[in-house]
Amino acid sequence: MFKRISVFGLAVAAVAVLSSPICGNQQPRVAQPDGERTKIFAFASNEELSRWTIAGDVAIDAAKTRSGSGRSLKVGPGGKAVLKLRDSDESGKIDVWVYDDGTTPEDAKAGRVGPRWGLVQSDGKVLAAGILYASYLGGAEGYTATACDGRQWFEQLFWLGVNRIPAGWHKWTFDVDTEVGLQLLHNDRQVNAVDSRNTGLKGFSAFAVWGDEDTGKKQTIWLADLSVTLGGPVDIPPIIEADPYAETASAAEMPSSDSIIVYTKENAPATPKLEDLPLRQSVSQYDISWTFEQPARVGRFVNGDWYVVGPVTIKAIDPRPLYGSEIPRRELDRTDRNRPEAQRVRNGFMLNPPAQMRVAYDSGVRNWFDASLIQKLPVTMKPGDSLVSTISMPKNLVLHAQLRNKIERGVDDSSPIRTAAVLTCVGEPQPADAFRPAFCDRQQKIYRARNLKRKLLPAVAATNSIPKVKQYVRFTRRPWVGTCFFGFEEPVENMPQYGLEYGRVVGISSLLLCTDIDPQQKEPLLVNFVQVGIDLGGMIRAGHPGWTGWGGHGSGRKLPIVFAGLLLGDDELANINKSFPKVSFGEDEQTAYGDCWTGATVVFTGHSGIDAATGAGRPRGRGWGPYEHTPPSQWKAGQNTCESYRRCCTSVGWVAQALSLRLMHAEKSWNHDAFFDYVDRWMYEDDGAFVQAIKEATGADHDHEWARQGQAWDAFVEDMWARHRSKLQSPTDGWKQQHDDSYYRKAVEMSRR
């Protein structure tokens, strides 16, 4: 249900000892660590077989050949053959051809172990490819890899997505690189489903093949042209885990209390003259440095981001962007390896990123990477331009994300981008209270902090559970440059990595700004939060389609835009879904007025909600659209998925947002009343009986503290709700009152077409 769920592959766990020891009187001569010599096993005679430890039905077969000449090794049901190569576990490469005639058991969904072949470590750990059968595997159609102890074959599985059909010879390559680790290839094409680190293999000392189970409809396989090249010790860097949001880690970039200025019209700063600005050869921010071809006049916006008075040419960026073969092999992840070398990039940058789901920062970005947007230095900037530069995530680094999740390059759908910074080119100096224009805004609309309508912010009493404001200053300090979706390209050190956390971060940030804490303490968070809204609003103005309801992913973007619009007096932003009615926002698309099976009159509209552009429910072919108008007894898998997302990944992230908007009396600007009434329903409706009814009808158990209604995961949000929600003039029972539900009924009808 959460973001880090893998879509493909199976993984459970790995342990280890071979069912029988590896031994043999003779060992083949194979390559030394220099890797220059390769030993070929052609199975030409029984003498060659004496180098193996064999058991059961294993023999040289002169009748089965791969290329019309030579022989093969036949391994029948119950057979086993082990070739010991050395005593130590080190690197090397094994190529082998395996003949699969396509035989399958009578019941291919019953648990069964078919033929396997692969590497063995000296402690008995195995990494093998082969044919395994289970209800959750397609053993009749394709191959599975297993990392195990040679006995518990289903402990850790990797579905390879490689077809067994057509029947015949298949080439398998097990390549344990000294720096990269294990790489598995089928017919010379890399199979990315196997993550080297998840195999438990640190090298190998033997090669083995195991025959089919000796029961039922049996299969025999043949091996031919086995080649072995041995290398030296494997040297893979250890995993490093870090929290960039820890207080000690972020202290250096946080503003000191004596540097915080609350700019107003009464103390508005003057606009400097060009000659008053420092003349610099380079500027740096967030570990990214830009070097100019010639010294240039530079300044800083109110949030600390740099601007340069242009035109100007950037001749160097540090860390240096890397392209193609410049990227070390050990740093290539699965997504990289699927791209042509010429399309690989690290530490990339984009001049004027489009407000579209297309980026070229890092070739490890899934779905949205567009190699045609790759740029190289030097790059010339003119007034109106924005340059977004990034630092890529190295492999073997695990970073804590905001509030929840850990991110690691190449693992599941994690972002491969570590951080980002924005350099803006302007035509003239800017006052110290100027906000950076949105990085997608080529017209460079510049707002000023002196004009912030701070009186719109209430000063309600904060509860004792208030979090450290500095944490949320850090959460919002670096630019939120995510123009895509699913978090595939969002800098981990800049912004939340999942929509639920977007919702929680923006909700708590706005709620903090509505409390009675000292205005000077609020100011850095206020400036950062408004800047986030300016950037998100700038994307919409430049044509971005918004953030659709898709599980929890679409939440958290609308509030900063509305908030910034209100505080800046920009009606277009303050009323964003009136200004751009076809733009998607998850909170709006996933809530609507309608009769719910629980008796409520407002509903969650499903995992994928209602399309703002068309008004149609989005079942996406999986039943992921509107569903709460039907009782649980009618729910199928898709509706159960919707209910899970309602409880795990959306509603809890909306509570602080709704409360802060109500405290600001911003319901009219938000322009979607169903959202507020739905959140009231979430917090006030007693779902005890409904949870039981769902369990009885579907078997799904939602009786977990984190999944129940009436809570928001964050103590501060829950305490603020309890103290302040009932005191507001807006009724708390709107979720019980009748409303016009024609929008919902139409969406349901359209989703059936």
Image (tube, rainbow, N blue to C red):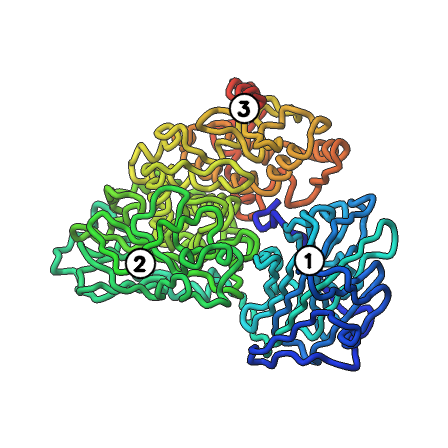
Q: Estimate the spatial distance between the alpha carbons at disc 3 and disc 2, rounded to whole Å.
A: 51 Å
Q: Is residue 349 above or below residue 732?
A: below
Residue type marked 1: Ala
- Asked if marks 2 and 1 touch (Cβ < 8 Å), the reply is no
Q: Secondary structure at mark 3?
A: strand
Residue 145's label in the rendered image is 1
Asked whether residue 367 appears in the rendered view, the answer is yes
- Asked if marks 1 and 3 touch (Cβ < 8 Å), the reply is no
Residue type marked 2: Lys
| Residue with the mark numbered 3 | 593
Q: Secondary structure at mark 1?
A: strand
State the residue in front, 20 or 7.
20
Question: How many other residues sit within 10 Å of disc 3, few (<14), some (14-19) or many (≥20)?
Answer: many
- Specify the quadrant that holds the N terminus: top right
Residue type marked 3: Tyr
Could you say which quadrant of the image residue 705 lies in?
Answer: top right
State the residue in front, 149 or 388.
149
State the residue in front, 35 or 441.
35
Q: Estimate the spatial distance between the alpha carbons at disc 1 and disc 3, rounded to whole Å.
A: 49 Å
Question: How many other residues sit within 10 Å of disc 2, few (<14), some (14-19) or many (≥20)?
Answer: some
Q: Is residue 50 above or below residue 241?
A: below
Asked whether residue 496 appears in the rendered view, the answer is no
| Residue at image point 64% right, 35% down | 643
| Residue at image point 67% right, 66% down | 225
Residue 376's label in the rendered image is 2
